[in-house]
Each structure stands twice: as structure tokens, then as C-alpha cells.
Amino acid sequence: MDCLDEIEDPRAASNGTLYDFREMLVIAICASLCDMDTCEDFAVWAQAREPWLRKFLTLKNGTPSSATFYRLFRTLDPKQFETFFRRWVGQIIPAAAAPGQMAIDGKTIRGSADGTRRPAHIVSAFSTDLGIVFGQERVEEKSNEITAIPELLEALYVKGFLVSIDAMGCQKDIARKIIDKGGDYLLMVKGNQPGLLQQVSDAFVEEQRAQMSCFEHLDDRHGRLVSQITWTAPAQQAAIDTQDWPNCRTLAMVASLRQVGGRCSELEQRYYLSSREMTPEEMAKTIRAHWAVENKLHWMLDVNFGEDACTVKKDNAPEILSLIRRVVINLLSLDTTQPSFTKKKLSKRQKRKFANWDENLMRNILGLQPL
């Protein structure tokens, strides 16, 4: 609630503001934690749990309707809400947590397209070590991730982190921004930087790879066999211009094959550059860790929170709802509550369901204290 004080109430007092907007946001976060995904869900859940909510909130005029939630989300300033989010994240990160890897990637909320307006596209910064979201930035209507990523980096604490970004973020200005803020970068190199791609790939021709150390990783989970071999080389080997790519120290090539049943994919080769010195094994682990942003965040949002199926379209509502979902994901990732009825560690999906069934579990995850 202290962090929410930074957000201004967007509603005019003359419109009859029956409900405290901060209490409405707390209700939305609680409801989302309890497996509720829409404004209609939030309103019905609040009605059902009003006696419990009154232990923590005033609720002077009862609980809001779904239309009231929607109107608030449409008009809330997303920049202010993002500021609240980052401040709150800074308070909940364990004090002993060392800087690790920060994966930056974008996701489109497909159901948010509105006529000629394209669906909202959100770029998130995700801690692969803690499993939490540090912040997000919406890509503007006539822009792309290249402009959104520097804005997100500017707002975040990057010092000591290894920031990994896919090929869209392989830009000189982005690499410079990360170095200037005290971080290191790991960038995928693809056809959007043809000259750089040629330089890096030339450092890993077959004759030279034969003289390099490498690391091989086999993954036979999920009904498929994936084989990856990673090579690294010093940046000097490709004469990388350190004016364009500051502090560049390591180049990498990853060759991978995927076999599903009796069918084998074509050989895939990917290239990277980084400002941090890494062995082939360290590079392989870091590259695999980057995809946690897909597996632990984007997949979770789609499958367990129904984000792509959400048809909220108007104004700021898609972005506000996306931030509420990320608040809940962070709560679930950092929660260490172990229900007494089982010794098995609960998944995030199970925690959402059990939180709805067990008010004590919900209170523990939220860290709420009765009034």
C-alpha cells in the first residue's frame, strides 16, 4: 500500500469515486493470485470474499463491479503503475541475492487487438535466477522493441547483471547502454546485423573449430532428444570493433540438433557476442538460462493466466492487467509457504488454486496483516 501511494487516482472526484482505487488494486492482485483472470472474475471474487477482505481493507462502500474495475484499469497511468511495480520489486528481492542474469524479451497479448490498433506488445526484464519480473515496457504503436529496450534498461538497476537479449536487441546503442550502467551483455547475432554476423561466423569455420575447446549438452526431456555443442572464442579472433561493441570479450557458436521420434531436424547454428569472458560450459548454461523468460514467464502467462485469451482492449487496461499478473508471478516465485497437507512442492498453478481454497495460505503468500 505504501508503494501504491505513488500512483495518482485518475478519476475525477465529481464522478462519484465510491471505491478507494488502491483498495481496488489490492483486490485485483488478491483475486488474480486466487486463479481469477478477468474483471468479471475480480468483481465476483470480491463479493464472495468481502468478509475476509474487510480484515485488511476498509471497503467503505462494499466491493466494486466489473465495470468499475475496467474503467479504473483503462485510465490508470501505466508509467506510474510501472514505477510502483519496480519500487515494490526492489523491496521484495532478498537482500542476500547477488546480481545474476537478466533476460529481456517481448510478448504480444494477442487478444488485445482493437480494430486497426495492433495488440499490445510488452517487453519484460526477467531474473532467470529468482524467477521474478524486474520491470516491463510497452512497445509504442508505431515503434518496436529496439526503442522499448533502452527505456526499460534506463529504469532498471543493471549493475553486475549479465543482460541477455535475442537478435532484436543486438544493437550498438543497447550494448553501450548496458555497459554504461555497469552491466554485461550477451546478445544473439542474426541477419539484422549482416556484417557482424559474417565476422562472428568466420571465427568458427570448421578448421578453426577443430582447434577449439567445446561443451556438449544432451537433453532428453519432454519426449525429444536435443544435442547442443557450444564453442567460444576471444573477440579479437574476429577483430570486433570495441567502439561499436564496447568491452566485447567473447564470441560463441551453438550448433544444435533436435530429434523427435525417428525424425531429426536440420542442423541449427546460432551466434552470440558478450562483454563477459566465459568458457564454453558457462556460455552454454547462460544461453539456456535465457529461455527461462519464455518457459517460466511467457508460457505461464498464456497457460495459467490466460493472457492471450484475454480480450481486454481499451486504452491502458491491457498493460495494467499485464502488470497485475506479473505482481502475482513474483509473489508466487518468492513464496516459500509449504502447506501442511503435503510434502510435495506446489507448482505456481497449484498455489493459485490452493490460495483460493485456503485463506491462511493466501494471506501468507501476500504477507498481509489484519487491520
Image (cartoon, grey):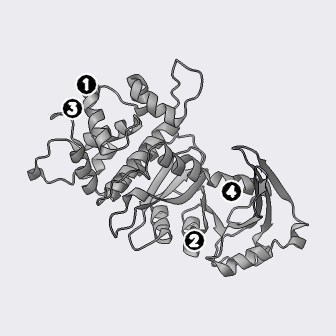
CA gap between label 1 and label 3 equals 11 Å
Q: Residue at x 38, y 46 (%)?
A: 324
Residue count near mark 1 (Cα–Cα under 10 Å), binned few <14, some 14–19, many ≥20: few
Check disc 4 and report its element: helix, strand or loop.
helix
Q: Amino acid at mark 4?
A: Ile
- Are there few (<14), some (14-19), or many (20+) residues within 10 Å of tag 3? few
Secondary structure state at the residue bearing disc 3? loop
Residue ID at (45%, 66%): 151
Numbered circle sitting on residue 58: 3
Tag 1: residue type?
A: Pro
Of the pair 241 and 126, the residue shown nearer to us: 126
- Give the CA separation, mark 1 to mark 4: 48 Å
Q: Nearer the viewer, residue 167 or 242?
A: 167
Cβ atoms at labels 4 and 2 below 8 Å apart: no
Local secondary structure at mark 1 = helix
Q: Which residue is mark 2?
A: 176
Can residue 88 be seen from the camera position used here?
Answer: no
CB within 8 Å, label 2 to label 1: no
Q: Does 86 sit left or right of 233 as displayed? A: left
Q: Of the residues under marks 1 and 3, which one precedes in the sequence?
A: 1
Circle 4 or circle 2, nearest the eye: 4
Residue labelled with disc 4: 287
Q: CA distance from mark 2 to mark 3?
A: 49 Å
